Amino acid sequence: MTSHSILFYENQLKQQIMNNLSSEHMISLQVYIKILIQENPDDYKNINYAYLNIKRELVRAIEC
């Protein structure tokens, strides 16, 4: 169940990134994560793991 939860939050973060690219009203990922944690305090670890996975993925993409 935990891996499903992490994947869910990874998808939420990816969606937020895409929204930021196409919108004038940008919300930083850090702010978005704080909102997610406030709305889902029991999942704070999974949200942070998802953030780290997305961050790692972005860094790899930049390095290539």
Image (cartoon, rainbow, N blue to C red):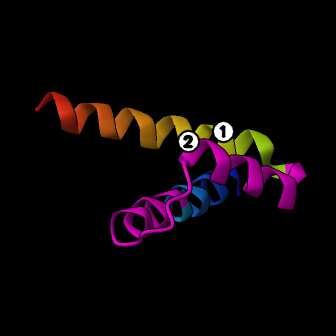
Q: Does residue 9 sit above or below 29 in this rendering?
A: below
The percent position of residue 9, horizontal first and vertical second, equals 60, 58
Rendered residue at 16%/27% (across/down): 63
Mark 1 closeness class: few <14, some 14–19, many ≥20 residues within 10 Å: some
Mark 1: secondary structure: helix
User: Which residue of the protein is positioned furthest toward the top in this rendering?
Assistant: 63
**Magenta segment boundaries in residue numbering:** 13-42
The front one of 38 and 20 is 20
Task: Tell whether label 2 touches label 1 (CB within 8 Å).
Answer: yes
Q: Which quarter of the rendering shows the C terminus?
A: top left
Mark 2: secondary structure: helix
The percent position of residue 58, horizontal first and vertical second, equals 32, 39
User: Which residue of the protein is positioned furthest toward the front in this rendering?
Assistant: 24
Rendered residue at 47%/39% (across/down): 53
User: Taken as a whole, is the magenta stretch helix, strand or loop?
Assistant: helix
| Quadrant in which residue 1 is drawn | bottom right
Along the horizontal axis of the image, is 20 left or right of 3?
A: left
* Mark 1 residue type: Asn
Mark 2 closeness class: few <14, some 14–19, many ≥20 residues within 10 Å: many
* Mark 2 residue type: Tyr
Rendered residue at 30%/31% (across/down): 59
Q: Does residue 23 sit above or below 56 in this rendering?
A: below
Residue 19 lies in magenta, yes or no?
Answer: yes
Residue 40 is at least partly visible in this image: no
Question: Which circle marks residue 48 in the picture?
Answer: 1
The percent position of residue 52, horizontal first and vertical second, equals 52, 34
Rendered residue at 51%/67% (across/down): 25
Say which residue label 2 marks: 51
